[in-house]
Image (spheres, rainbow, N blue to C red):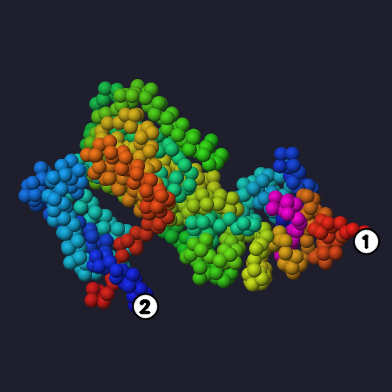
């Protein structure tokens, strides 16, 4: 059985059909890509999988457990981490607090601990702090731990967001355009981060990306989404040479 | 370490006064203030006589100055001789000793050091309040205001929702606690004979307050269930409605006196009781907002969808914070009823709401220390300006507007309340170590 399975998922926004009959199977260790023109419904698929929207039809399951109808925080705690296209960092919190926050579901000190500051809370807080610093260190941003996220350069913010997503101990990591708006240097750095994550963590990655270079280099299989429908699926080479994909991106070739 | 210190000293060089006082730890200031309070206790009356003041100036001479401007020099001299000079000189002179004691205390557990500082603070308040009953009442009401402001800050500041039902929660707490104590301990016309002797009062009072807090939290649950399913302004509207519902509910309950109010509460809210509850409130709320579970409130406020995606149970977080804030408002209300020993539903209306909101936004959002400063500052300011009568209500709003223009989130917003750092010794140069 695949780790993450999506079967015949269809979603309507009132009358508008955003996603139609979408299927996906991801096994542990896979790296899968999702490409498509703007407005094709890529982020909607992420939101459907992570429980932000509930799909109109179809089934989503993680390791055999159905995700449909569960709240996003439950789904995240089950091991589905994600990043956002616009990062969605918390503007009044430090880098370390960001990563600590993502350990929320792993805390067990409860309300007594929160209100009264019990020894158990101290222990758990220092444990997640240690793990958070370790994650930040792994991504090379530990020296910014005490700074407010808004004061940091874009590339660092992206890494903080990545560390935050890794902190929930994901089994599948959904990345929504992680390299958007990056300079070539930042991009190269991000590629190093991707490789590091693949080496260090036992997880599958599902990636939305516009940069062909990134998709081609990282992904084993790619889906192309146009108007909510998958028009092509295959290895990077197959996709690159698929006439339907070329048509979707560049328009139809005039017959000379 | 030396390299770290030199720039700090350089920064402070421009202001001589500030440099003179920068080496004094919190303990030193407290010792100075104790000395000033004792000085006033023994020398206040003769000194006030000597400066031609009718009696000891109750609030740092402000009231006297505004009432009779001719007495201004006398009042200023009094403030200088009784407060400014003793506090300044004694805390400066004792600073080598107090620094050494602070250093010793900083090596002990934090709670021990905190208890000692709090005991000193209580001593100051006790002596200061002994001079007049008016001061005593002011202090009690200020401490209750701290509790209300802080608990509202949890909802409006830390969580970023706009709740208007704090007077309602206060009323629930005030009436629940009053019914409990009056019903059990006092012969009342409406609630019948006393069941238990009044000597049990101090044992039962905490139970009464906690009961009040739970009633308020229950009220919060009723507001929260429909409103947290929606977003933004809806909570403000629902909570405002809730406040009016509570008010008219009490107005129509003849058992608790209806619109005439309810009196005769036993005199249980003494200064130490109020002080202890206020400290408890600050302590638990600070604990909460410093924990990762509490910081989830900030995450919910800044970017709720990201919080959910990071496994934060946003619904539970919001519910807890709302009920926790309401609980402390209820306890504050219970204390309020027993300080005044009379409550009526008219107290818990729009005016009270405006007052609490003003204290929160004046002091600073998302900050424990801001709430303390806001509540105490606002209370004292409004008492000090009392002689101005109607002009008081022009000056205070203007001040609020100025704060909003220059510091849109309040005087001391978004700051951590770091007890350890506040209580730490201030060692700046070698000869003082």
Q: Residue under label 2, please give it.
A: B3
Whole-angstrom CA distance, mark 2 to mark 1, is 75 Å
Up/down of B252 relative to A80, above or below: above
- Percent x, y of residue B381: 27, 45
* Helix, strand or loop status at disc 2: helix
Range of magenta residues: A23-45
Q: Is residue B391 left or right of residue B171?
A: left
Q: Is residue B133 left or right of residue B206?
A: left
* Helix, strand or loop status at disc 1: loop
Q: Chain of mark 1?
A: A
**Residue drawn at point x = 49 percent, y = 34 percent:** B238
- Percent x, y of residue B200: 25, 37
Quadrant assignment for the N terminus of chain B: bottom left
- Percent x, y of residue B293: 48, 53
Determine crowd level at label 2: few under 14, some 14-19, many 20+ residues with C-alpha closer than 10 A: few
Is residue B115 in view from this perspective?
yes
Determine crowd level at label 1: few under 14, some 14-19, many 20+ residues with C-alpha closer than 10 A: few
* Residue A33 within the segment the image draws in magenta: yes
Q: Are marks 2 and 1 on the same chain?
A: no
Q: Is residue B77 left or right of residue B169?
A: left
**Residue drawn at point x = 52 percent, y = 52 percent:** B302
* Residue A26 within the segment the image draws in magenta: yes
**Residue drawn at point x = 58 percent, y = 53 percent:** B306
Nearest the camera: A62 or A160?
Answer: A160
Is residue B203 in view from this perspective?
no
* Residue A256 circle label: 1
**Residue drawn at point x = 34 percent, y = 23 percent:** B258
- Percent x, y of residue A249: 80, 58
Q: Chain of mark 2?
A: B
Residue B424, quarter of picture: bottom left
Point out the frontmost of discs 2 and 1.
1
């Amino acid at each position: 059985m695949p780790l993450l399975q999506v079967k015949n998922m269809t979603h309507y926004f009132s009358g508008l059909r955003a996603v139609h009959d979408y299927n996906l199977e991801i096994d542990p260790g896979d790296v899968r890509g999702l490409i498509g023109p703007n407005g094709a419904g890529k982020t909607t698929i992420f939101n459907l999988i992570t429980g932000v929207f509930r799909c109109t039809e179809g089934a989503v399951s993680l390791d055999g457990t159905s995700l449909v109808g569960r709240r996003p925080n439950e789904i995240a705690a089950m091991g589905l981490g994600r990043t956002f296209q616009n990062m969605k960092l918390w503007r009044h919190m430090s880098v370390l607090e960001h990563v600590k926050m993502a350990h929320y579901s792993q805390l067990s000190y409860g309300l007594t601990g929160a209100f009264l500051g019990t020894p158990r809370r101290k222990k758990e807080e220092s444990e997640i702090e240690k793990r958070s610093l370790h994650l930040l260190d792994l991504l090379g941003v530990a020296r910014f731990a005490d700074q407010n996220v808004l004061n940091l350069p874009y590339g660092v913010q992206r890494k903080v967001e990545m560390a935050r997503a890794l902190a929930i101990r994901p089994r599948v990591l959904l990345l929504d355009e992680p390299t958007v708006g990056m300079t070539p240097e930042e991009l190269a750095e991000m590629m190093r981060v991707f490789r590091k994550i693949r080496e260090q963590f036992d997880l599958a990655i599902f990636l939305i990306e516009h940069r062909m270079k990134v998709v081609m280099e990282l992904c084993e299989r790619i889906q192309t989404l146009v108007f909510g429908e998958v028009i092509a699926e295959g290895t990077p080479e197959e996709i690159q040479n698929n006439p339907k994909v070329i048509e979707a991106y560049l328009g139809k070739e005039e017959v000379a | 370490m030396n390299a770290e210190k030199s720039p700090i000293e350089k920064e402070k060089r421009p202001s001589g006064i500030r440099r003179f006082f920068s080496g004094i730890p919190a303990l030193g200031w407290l010792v100075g203030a104790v000395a000033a309070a004792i000085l006033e206790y023994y020398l206040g009356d003769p000194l006030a006589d000597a400066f031609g003041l009718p009696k000891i100036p109750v609030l740092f001479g402000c009231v006297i100055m505004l009432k009779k401007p001719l007495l201004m020099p006398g009042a200023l001299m009094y403030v200088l001789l009784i407060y400014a000079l003793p506090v300044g000189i004694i805390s400066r002179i004792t600073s080598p000793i107090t620094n050494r004691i602070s250093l010793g205390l900083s090596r002990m557990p934090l709670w021990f050091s905190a208890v000692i500082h709090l005991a000193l603070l209580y001593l100051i308040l006790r002596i200061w309040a002994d001079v007049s009953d008016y001061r005593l009442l002011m202090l009690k009401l200020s401490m209750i205001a701290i509790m209300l402001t802080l608990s509202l800050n949890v909802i409006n500041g830390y969580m970023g929702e706009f709740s208007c039902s704090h007077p309602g929660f206060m009323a629930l707490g005030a009436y629940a606690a009053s019914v409990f104590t009056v019903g059990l301990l006092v012969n009342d016309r409406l609630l019948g004979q006393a069941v238990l002797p009044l000597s049990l009062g101090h044992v039962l009072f905490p139970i009464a307050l906690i009961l009040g807090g739970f009633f308020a939290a229950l009220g919060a649950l009723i507001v929260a269930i429909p409103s947290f399913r929606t977003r933004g302004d809806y909570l403000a509207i629902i909570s405002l409605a809730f406040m009016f519902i509570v008010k008219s509910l009490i107005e129509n309950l003849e058992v608790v006196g209806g619109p005439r109010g309810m009196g005769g509460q036993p005199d249980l809210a003494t200064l130490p009781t109020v002080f202890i509850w206020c400290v408890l409130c600050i302590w638990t709320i600070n604990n909460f907002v410093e924990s990762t579970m509490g910081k989830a409130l900030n995450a919910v406020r800044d970017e709720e969808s990201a919080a959910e995606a990071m496994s934060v149970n946003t619904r539970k977080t919001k519910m807890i914070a709302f009920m926790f804030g309401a609980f402390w408002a209820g306890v504050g209300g219970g204390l309020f009823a027993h300080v005044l020993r009379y409550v009526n539903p008219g107290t818990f209306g729009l005016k009270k709401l405006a007052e609490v909101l003003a204290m929160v936004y004046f002091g600073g959002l998302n900050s424990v220390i801001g709430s303390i400063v806001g509540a105490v500052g606002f209370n004292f300011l409004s008492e000090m300006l009392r002689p101005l009568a109607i002009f008081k209500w022009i000056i205070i709003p203007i001040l609020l507007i100025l704060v909003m223009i220059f510091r849109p989130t309040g005087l001391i917003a978004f700051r951590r309340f770091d007890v350890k750092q506040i209580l730490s010794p201030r060692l700046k140069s070698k000869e003082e170590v």
